[in-house]
Amino acid sequence: MNLVEIAQLAATAAEEKKAQNVTILDIRGLSVFADYFVICHGNSQTQVQAIVSGIKEKVLESDIILKGIEGYQDARWVLIDLGDVVVHVFHKDEREFYDLERLWGDAQYVRVQ
């Protein structure tokens, strides 16, 4: 599975848990720590945790290496490290505050399958 397919798998898993505004950014050439960001949000702590759990389940089913998950307990901004694909699952308020899409404004958008 290539990196775009991994990002799309994570994005689809997020959508299955009703994540809002699921976005994939191609940050190749803009970042040294990742090639793709998947960004989405939930409207409650419980939903954020459900989205993260759904992504984790799909990733492990597909034999993709899950390097780590940070922020799950607080469920305000959860990072899922899939190597060159990093998934950001925000609580709605934090997503609006940090606005990663604006911060990485030079990135190209990739279509979510």
Image (tube, rainbow, N blue to C red):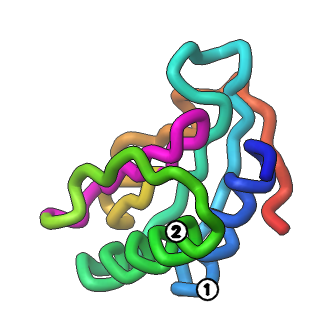
Residue picked out by circle 1: 16
Query: Is 34 left, or right, of 81 in this rendering?
Result: right
Residue 90, by quadrant, is: bottom left
Q: Is residue 108 above or below residue 7?
A: above
Residue 8, by quadrant, is: bottom right
Q: How many numbered marks, from 0 up? A: 2
Pick the front one: 83 or 52: 83
Q: Is residue 94 above or below residue 104?
A: below
Q: Is residue 68 above or below residue 57?
A: above
Point out residue 26 in the picture as x, y percentages from the top left corner: 74, 34
| Residue at x 79% of width, y 55% of height | 5
Check disc 2 and report its element: helix, strand or loop.
Answer: helix
Mark 1 Cα within 10 Å, few/some/many (few <14, many 20+)? few
Q: Residue furthest left?
A: 74
Is residue 74 visible in this depiction of the protein? yes
| Residue at x 65% of width, y 15% of height | 30
Q: Residue furthest front?
A: 63
Q: Is residue 51 above or below residue 40?
A: below
Amino acid of disc 1 = Glu
Query: Is 55 left, or right, of 16 in this rendering?
Result: left
Badge number at residue 60: 2
Is residue 96 visible in this depiction of the protein? no
Mark 2 vs 1, N-terminal side: 1
Pick the front one: 69 or 64: 64
Q: Which residues are magenta?
A: 74-87
Point out residue 48 in the picture as x, y percentages from the top left corner: 35, 74
Mark 2 Cα within 10 Å, few/some/many (few <14, many 20+)? few
Q: Are marks 2 and 1 in contact (CB under 8 Å)?
A: no
Point out residue 113 in the picture as x, y percentages from the top left corner: 84, 68
Check disc 1 and report its element: helix, strand or loop.
Answer: helix
Amino acid of disc 2 = Leu
